[in-house]
Image (cartoon, coloured by chain):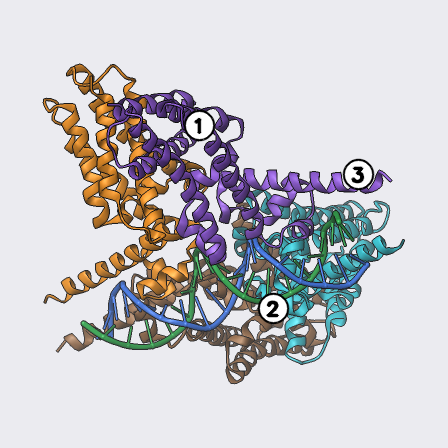
Chain colours: A cyan, B brown, C purple, D orange, E green, F blue
Amino acid sequence: MGVTERRLREKESRIESIKKSAARLFARKGFSNVSMAEIAEAAEVSKGTLYIYFKSKEELYFSLIEPVLVNHHKLIARMVSDDSEPADESLRKFFDYFADSYPLDPQAHQPYMYYRAEEVQPLFSEERHDYLKTLMAKNVETIEAVILRGIEQGIFKSVNPRAVSSILWSLVTGVLRWEENRKFARSGDFLESTLQTAMNLILDGLKM
Amino acid sequence: MGVTERRLREKESRIESIKKSAARLFARKGFSNVSMAEIAEAAEVSKGTLYIYFKSKEELYFSLIEPVLVNHHKLIARMVSDDSEPADESLRKFFDYFADSYPLDPQAHQPYMYYRAEEVQPLFSEERHDYLKTLMAKNVETIEAVILRGIEQGIFKSVNPRAVSSILWSLVTGVLRWEENRKFARSGDFLESTLQTAMNLILDGLKM
Amino acid sequence: MGVTERRLREKESRIESIKKSAARLFARKGFSNVSMAEIAEAAEVSKGTLYIYFKSKEELYFSLIEPVLVNHHKLIARMVSDDSEPADESLRKFFDYFADSYPLDPQAHQPYMYYRAEEVQPLFSEERHDYLKTLMAKNVETIEAVILRGIEQGIFKSVNPRAVSSILWSLVTGVLRWEENRKFARSGDFLESTLQTAMNLILDGLKM
Amino acid sequence: MGVTERRLREKESRIESIKKSAARLFARKGFSNVSMAEIAEAAEVSKGTLYIYFKSKEELYFSLIEPVLVNHHKLIARMVSDDSEPADESLRKFFDYFADSYPLDPQAHQPYMYYRAEEVQPLFSEERHDYLKTLMAKNVETIEAVILRGIEQGIFKSVNPRAVSSILWSLVTGVLRWEENRKFARSGDFLESTLQTAMNLILDGLKM
DNA sequence: TATGAATGAGGCTTCATTCAT
DNA sequence: CATGAATGAAGCCTCATTCAT
């Protein structure tokens, strides 16, 4: 029978529905401003059902954050991993990644955009928090390596690679947040062009 | 009598104490994760006293946000208001303002750093929310004017001034958040040097 | 077919497994502190299965209590039913019964040890509760008859048989509980010797 | 002003009201079968008020149990502390204490009557549970000392003092429970006479 | 018959706010 | 004005029970 399979599919679709609803709500209002009841209603399941799949509100939140951080890291790391590629090309890909993927799935980017160590820390165990920090640190290191490569390739000025990596991440997350706020305020959507402009400025500034 | 005066002074110091405590707590943990009891204790007043001076938790929050936004706007507007000044000088002042004033009073900058339209909106009346939006929009326009001036002065490339203004604000708030998280994670304090580097990159990128 | 038989056997073993698991858990943690999920897991069946065989949690509990009460009554009644036997012999059997059978199946004795009218009453219908009361009353009457016999046989002093019967039951259940707590506190197992001593004291006290 | 004092009195009376309601309910139905809402209603306060005075349901329970155990120990220890007193007199006081004090404040005796190590343990921290065990152990030791004294005084047979102490406690708590159940079942109140009879039997059994 | 996902009532607890003093 | 005890709505979570397969 395909019964078991169908069951499995239904179960997974329910989990997906919960995750999607939760992600949207958390992204829109922040962890503390979303109630489990709200999530349940949005996902069209009962409150109890949430707890079948997620041990707690924190667990649900974590299950949304973690794979996104892992995935982004993977994607970005792969994207910029070709050591023979000119570093400016790599950075361009980095920016394009956000310009392209953000509109497709804005919630997937929320963890970066709204990550706030002091708010998140009390939610998770020390271990988990360390894990999240490590994940985010890796991302900075990835871009740091690109900057370093650019300097070695003679394309970039002699800058502090770690600082510039921080700046690039700050800039990207800052712009995503900014444009999100702007969109919410109904004043148009300029994400792509803003990111383009930002990248051009930075690259021009970085190049020798 | 000096009694009335003393009373007045005591009252104002009480209000200041409340505001200071509340600002620190909101900044540290976010609006929803702070209780009125916590604020009262930190300010060394009773819970009831909070409600003498502030109609509600939202009101208290607003009373913290609003003057900061107004003040920042004033300071920044004044700082860059000399139309004869080279635009790159003005931007340098803009960056320096954050590098200098943030360490002195980090909380004062929280409203920008953590402003999140979707989270804040349900707290306030439409009117108030519009007011906040206007305040923030003015700041963007101020920097936009500087960029425009730079172009007219022949110092800057022909960029989209509105986009670059957004970028500068995104960059500054992004870096502030970034360094705040980093500091919280006990990995050192690089705010000033990071902001310096960021400004140099951007200015180099902007200049013809 | 032997199929039907096998089915029947499997079914009965399933029921036994449920009862056994439930008895152990109820005995260990008390009715309210045991969940149906826990019982199902311990019995290695699904939650739904519990409801095939027992209409409700209360029903399951009743199905454990009732036969034990009936059975104890039967055993004890038979044990002391020989009217020609010296009453002190009969009481000795009564005590020995607990000293011998408790260690073999402690859970079977829980209904007595922890019976608490006020807690049990809201669980059951009036009718059922009355039934349980009657069962327990019969036990008291059985021992009461032994005391009476002892007086008539000229072995026992002229005491109030009902009161002494209550005392004997109180003593036995009291000691069982006491030693259970002590065992749980890991301070050794003195059930048998304690019961022996108790019986000797009481018999010495009863005898003329 | 007496205002502060009256306030204090009102506050304490409220706490007393809560404790009294809680004690009655816990005694009647057991810890797990009582809800905080029930207690609040019985005490005629709001649910929130309970948490002003007691950090949690467990804490409230503990606040009822602990002083009773301490107090009983004190009373009983004092009662039997005169080493020159004949041991049978001391035991008589011990029994009388329960016969007299139980009807006056039955709830005060609940902790003994219904103490169940396995149910109570998960409620409390290890430390607290150890503390409770120690308190109860002290009581056994107190009576143990009386038995020993009786033997030394040549009044009692040469029995195992620890075992007999356990038996006396088991007997008393057993009888209290028994009569409580009987009372609840509306079949009369024989506590005093039952305890009297029990004591006479035991003393007769103990004496040489 | 057996399963286990789903339900929703109800339990414990927090907290913004009120109000008598 | 200042206090802090009191309130009760609302949040997180558990669990007995049902039901489609």
Percent position (x, y) of residue A75?
Answer: 79, 52
- How far apart are the two marked residues, 1 and 2, measured between alpha carbons? 71 Å
Bin the neighbour count of mark 3 within 10 Å (Cα to Cα): few under 14, some 14-19, many 20 and up.
Answer: few
Percent position (x, y) of residue B208?
Answer: 73, 68
- How far apart are the two marked residues, 3 and 2, measured between alpha carbons? 50 Å
Bin the neighbour count of mark 1 within 10 Å (Cα to Cα): few under 14, some 14-19, many 20 and up.
Answer: few
State which mark lies toward you, 1 or 2. 1
Label 2 marks which chain's residue? Answer: A
Which amino acid lies under the numbered mark 1 shown in the image of this protein?
A: Asp
Residue extending furthest bottom?
Answer: B127
Marks 3 and 2 belong to one chain: no
Residue C8 lies, with reference to residue A107, above or below; the image says: above
Rendering quarter of residue B130:
bottom right
Q: Nearer the viewer, residue A66 or A114?
A: A66
Q: Earlier in the sequence, mark 1 or mark 3?
A: 3
Which amino acid lies under the numbered mark 3 shown in the image of this protein?
A: Arg
Q: Is residue D116 left or right of residue C49?
A: left
> Which residue is drawn at the image coordinates 52% and 52% (left, top)?
A122
Q: Is residue C109 left or right of residue D91?
A: right
Which amino acid lies under the numbered mark 2 shown in the image of this protein?
A: Glu
> Which residue is drawn at the image coordinates 17% and 15% (left, top)?
D152
Rendering quarter of residue D117:
top left
The circle drawn on residue A82 is none
Residue that badge 1 annotates: C82
Asked whether the viewer can see residue C191, the reply is: yes
Marks 1 and 2 belong to one chain: no
Residue that badge 3 annotates: C6
Label 3 marks which chain's residue? Answer: C
Q: Nearer the viewer, residue A148 or B149?
A: A148
